[in-house]
Image (cartoon, rainbow, N blue to C red):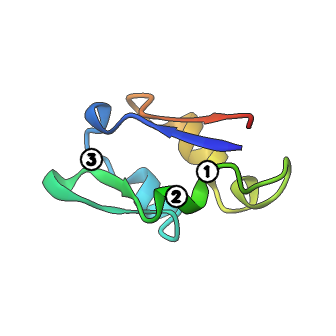
Amino acid sequence: MKIIYHFNKCVGCGLCVSTCPNIWQWGPGRKARLRNPNQVHDQWEEGEYPRQGGLIVVTSNCPVGAIKLEES
């Protein structure tokens, strides 16, 4: 699975940072940033870490739809 993140859509609500702090962190302008964008792409098999770590919750609950998951 691959994370698709639209930084310009982020409103800084903090859902992603509080739910998955090992993937997300605060960046400039209090907008979320991926901790390591190169590490998170294409590394998970279906049913592994993202569902256990709350990434599905973050994706479905982002109030502005800035975060999406895509099959790799």
**Which residue is depicted at the point 54% across and 46% down?**
58
User: In the rendered image, which residue does mark 1 sit on?
Assistant: 41
**Which residue is depicted at the point 53% across and 63% down?**
20
> Label 3 is placed on what type of residue?
Gly
Q: Give the image quarter of residue 24.
A: bottom left
Which numbered disc covers residue 26?
none
* In the image: residue 65, left or right of residue 42: left
Callouts 3 and 2 close, C-beta under 8 Å: no
Choose the circle earlier in sequence order: 3 or 1: 3
Which numbered disc covers residue 38?
2
From this view, report whether residue 45 is shown above or below residue 35. Answer: above
From this view, report whether residue 36 is shown above or below residue 66. Answer: below
CA–CA distance between discs 2 and 1? 6 Å
Residue 9 image point, x, y percent: 30, 31
In front of the other: 41 or 22: 41
Q: Residue furthest bottom?
A: 22
In front of the other: 12 or 27: 27
